[in-house]
Image: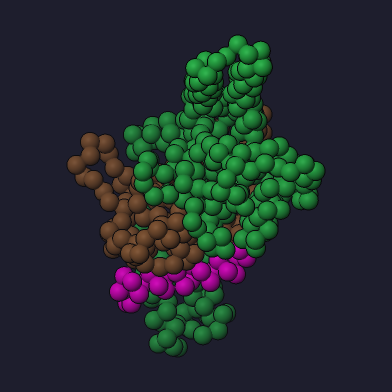
Chain colours: A green, B brown
Amino acid sequence: MRDHDLELIAALVEGRIEDEAEARALIDASPEMREEYEAQAAAHEALSSVGTAALTPSERTALHRDLWTALRQTETPVAHHPWYTRWAPVAAGMFVVIGLVAVLNQAGSLGGGDAATAEFTVTTIAGATQGDDTGDPESDRGGDGGGEAAPLAPSGGSVDEPAAEDVTRTLSASEEAFYAAEAEKVRAGDSDAVVLDELETDTPLTLLLQCLEDAGLEGFTVVGAEPQPMVAEEGTVSTVEIPADIAPFIAAIPEGADLESALIAFVDLFDCELIHVDE
Amino acid sequence: MTTAAQDAQLLARVVSGDHEAFSQIMKNHEDRVFSVCLRIMGNREQALDATQDTFLTAFRKAEQFKGNSALGTWIYRIAVNTCYDQLRRQNRRRTDPIPEHLDPIDYSAEEEVDSAALRPEIAQALAAIPPDFRAAVVLSDIEGIGLPEVAVILGVPVGTVKSRVFRGRRLLAEELGNQTV
């Protein structure tokens, strides 16, 4: 059947043909055309008999409520506190106590028993401070915490991979292109260049993993990370050009996953929010 | 029905943070968006999710609207893409085909249910045809949107829309088993 013939049939079915004679003649002349016309007309009539669906009152109410809740979460200003500021008090506290112990030791005021006591004191104070600080991320985010990604892995269960819809941040086209390209580099094994060189401070792995947990990525690991706390060597210089509008980030994959085929999650290093998921 | 100028004004107010303006946009378009999503998804709950996601996206991308098309057209385009995304995710997570029973109507509900519900056989037939063809016939034959506007919504040439509508109807007719007038 020629395109022109099919166009005639469609126009006849849809009632947008002025002179039906040509179309009718075509249909009458060919059983195949007649069959096609009747199928088109039957389907069109069945669909046209259905009107526009409408929301029920309760559906409308629920839609508005859920939508505005989601929008409020989106609009809640997120205080951008680099993750290391949350740990700074911990580090400061530890340095103070360790320094105090060192001074007292040098002054000879501590015997063996006292040294043990001092060590216990160091551990206790550091632990207490750390406990206080891990509560901070909730208040740092602002709002009622609804802006955070919900934990994606049930406790004690297997890793539940995030999907694109879990990302609440809206990216520009250039940002999306950047992360898509970065995902390719990660899968190609350039993970060291992507991750390690972009970290400008000493970054123990445990803190990076905490950042992933904050982003709802329990059971994930940082791409390119050593299975032990990392210490950036002196003189480490970033070899990767990051666009000015791209914040420092972590690339993460599920633990044990194959890098070439794994889902890659990008997490903002400043506020530990999920930026982008590349599947 | 608002004019294009009124819609553009409302959206400009949304961009400047006016939530009332967005409420008005929702009021103007939510039923049609829901209707499109319902006919494509075939399920009220999924359609509600898609409708919510559609307006969320519209809100977040309000400043990207250039006015090259009517606001409604732009929103419907977001709605169709949102439905496509949901269908793709469903297919990825399931091994079963899309369920045969669709658009369930609870006649025991106290509220009056939408009287424009699809007959089960039509709903079933729609669910059986590919999403691209389904969207085309939904927009054209159910929602009554002209082919040029459908082309803008789907982001394809008018000729492609005509082809999808034609083939979609053909497949639908085969599904309905109705070959004669």
Residue B168 within the segment the image draws in magenta: yes
Q: Is residue B139 visible?
A: no
Residue at 77 percent across and 41 percent down: it is: A234
Of residues A177 and B169, the one drawn nearer to the viewer in this rendering: A177
Q: Quadrant of residue A142?
A: top right
Foreground residue among A21 and B181: B181
Q: Position of residue B30 (x, y in %)?
A: 47, 40
Please say if A18 is above or below A62: below
The boundaries of the magenta stretch are B156-181
Q: Quadrant of residue A66?
A: top left
Residue A202 in view, yes or no? yes
Question: Is A108 in the magenta?
Answer: no
Viewer-side residue, A11 vs A236: A236
Rendering coords of residue A127 (x, y %): 50, 23
Where is A1 relative to A11, above or below? below
Residue B55, placed above or below residue B167 = above
Front residue of this view, candidates A184 and A252: A252
Would residue B52 appear left or right of A46 to someone viewing this image? right
Where does residue A94 sit, x and y in percent of width and height?
60, 22
- Magenta: main secondary structure equals helix
Percent position of residue A196, x then y: 68, 47
Q: Residue at x 21, y 45 (%)?
A: B107
Q: Identify the residue at image location x=65%, y=61%.
A: A189
The number of numbered discs placed on residues in the rendered structure image is 0
Horizontal side of A45 relative to A165 (left or right) equals left
Q: Quadrant of the C terminus of chain B?
A: bottom left
Residue at 55% across / 66% down in the picture?
Answer: B161
